[in-house]
Image (cartoon, rainbow, N blue to C red):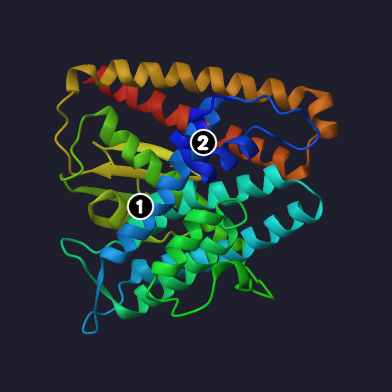
């Protein structure tokens, strides 16, 4: 190892980097880039603290519905992750335990939870959301302390919420309980948000430009307040009819129609649809081959097989929708 690596990335960054490339049962193949990834992860945690600490509590503010929903989701996710970490540590799978912490912070807390509850156009936040966020962030610090002892202890000491005591001697929840349905619902929500954001990127539509989302689905349990906040939508509503002159996609057997935008790429629309049709044809072919593979069917867990079948069904529905849209455009 280059002597400068710990100086550049910090002790916590190097520790995280080493564990990220050290899965159980294999030799460590050291890579300095992993230490950089570790440093970035530590910075992400520190920046999350700085963001939370920048907010001021306004006792007159009511808690928004999207904040209530985000807190419910993350409280359950914290309990689920704790059980996963404990299981991996008991089985001496420290790298897997680190990945549990990494995914919790990098993939969920920073890009979704904080963005959902972040005050709009001000630094003021309601008291209930702030208190719940401090509890959630404290739990995250306890998990991360296993691998990032120095930085997490410093953050813990600076947090106004923690008046005394060391993070190293703090206790974890003795009886973590979670609702898997709420966690799965939120994973669906993340996929929907990702699809809407991808649409904005593909069609060069600014995030400042409000859009409308219409949902055609038998299940009407989507957390529409979170979708509106995360995707800057002026309207989210349900329908039983097809919506014409819209961009559409299918997720979890539900159809989503985006409207209210000026299509500045109209001349490229047909090319875009053709590309997506070709993509889904290839994707469907790969899934069908996988499901015909006896080795995969016999060895894969039932949940994985079920998920692959769901992906196949959604992809076929999306393909039919795209083909119908292409026929409509070519006949105009």
Packing grade of label 1 (10 A; few <14, some 14-19, many >=20) is few
Split into 4 quadrants, where in the image is the C terminus? top left
In the image, residue 96 above or below residue 245:
below
User: How many numbered tags mark residues here?
Assistant: 2
Residue 82 visible at all: yes
* Residue at x-position 49% and y-position 23%: 280
Instruction: For marks 2 and 1, give the CA distance.
Output: 20 Å
Say which residue appears at 23% left-offset and 17% top-offset.
268
Left or right of 51 in this view: 19: right
Position of residue 233 in the picture relative to residue 16 (left or right):
left
Tag in front: 2 or 1: 2
To which residue does mark 1 refer?
A: 47
Tag 1, which secondary structure?
helix
Sequence order check, earlier mark of 2 and 1: 2
Q: Position of residue 322 (x, y in %)?
A: 39, 27
Name, please, the residue furthest toward the front. 3
Could you tell me which residue is drawn at 30 percent across and 15 percent down?
A: 271
Q: Which residue is mark 2?
A: 6
Q: Residues within 10 Å of mark 2 (few under 14, many from 20)?
A: some
For the N terminus, which image quadrant?
A: top right
| Residue placed most toward the observer, 205 or 176 | 176
Q: Is 227 drawn above or below residue 157 in the view shown?
A: above
Along the line of sight, the residue nearer the viewer: 241 or 72? 72
Viewer-closest of 39 and 244: 39
> Which dot marks residue 114?
none
- Occupied quadrant, residue 237: bottom left
Residue 46 at x, y percent in the picture:
39, 53
Q: Is residue 240 visible?
A: no
């Amino acid at each position: 190892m280059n002597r400068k690596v710990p100086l550049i990335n910090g002790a916590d960054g190097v520790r995280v980097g080493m564990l990220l490339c050290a899965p159980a049962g294999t030799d460590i193949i050291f890579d300095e880039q992993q230490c950089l990834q570790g440093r970035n992860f530590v910075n992400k945690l520190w920046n999350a603290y700085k963001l939370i600490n920048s907010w001021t509590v306004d006792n007159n503010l009511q808690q928004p519905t999207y904040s209530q929903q985000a807190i419910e989701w993350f409280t359950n996710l914290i309990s689920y992750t704790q059980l996963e970490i404990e299981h991996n540590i008991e089985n001496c799978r420290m790298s897997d335990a680190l990945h549990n912490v990494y995914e919790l912070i990098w993939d969920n807390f920073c890009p979704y939870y904080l963005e959902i509850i972040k005050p709009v156009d001000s630094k003021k936040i309601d008291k209930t959301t702030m208190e719940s966020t401090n509890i959630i962030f404290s739990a995250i610090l306890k998990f991360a302390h296993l691998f990032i002892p120095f930085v997490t202890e410093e953050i813990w000491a600076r947090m106004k919420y923690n008046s005394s005591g060391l993070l190293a001697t703090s206790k974890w929840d003795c009886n973590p309980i979670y609702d898997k349905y709420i966690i799965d619902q939120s994973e669906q929500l993340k996929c929907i948000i990702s699809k809407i954001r991808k649409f904005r990127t593909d069609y060069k539509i600014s995030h400042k430009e409000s859009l409308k989302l219409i949902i055609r689905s038998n299940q009407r349990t989507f957390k529409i307040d979170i979708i509106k906040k995360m995707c800057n939508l002026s309207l989210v509503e349900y329908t039983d009819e097809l919506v014409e002159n819209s961009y559409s996609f299918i997720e979890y057997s539900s159809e989503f129609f985006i409207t209210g935008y000026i299509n500045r790429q109209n001349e490229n629309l047909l090319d875009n649809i053709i590309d997506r049709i070709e993509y889904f044809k290839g994707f469907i072919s790969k899934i069908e081959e996988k499901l015909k593979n006896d080795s995969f069917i016999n060895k894969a867990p039932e949940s994985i097989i079920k998920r692959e079948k769901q992906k196949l069904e959604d992809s076929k529905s999306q393909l039919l929708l795209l083909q119908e849209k292409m026929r409509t455009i070519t006949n105009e």
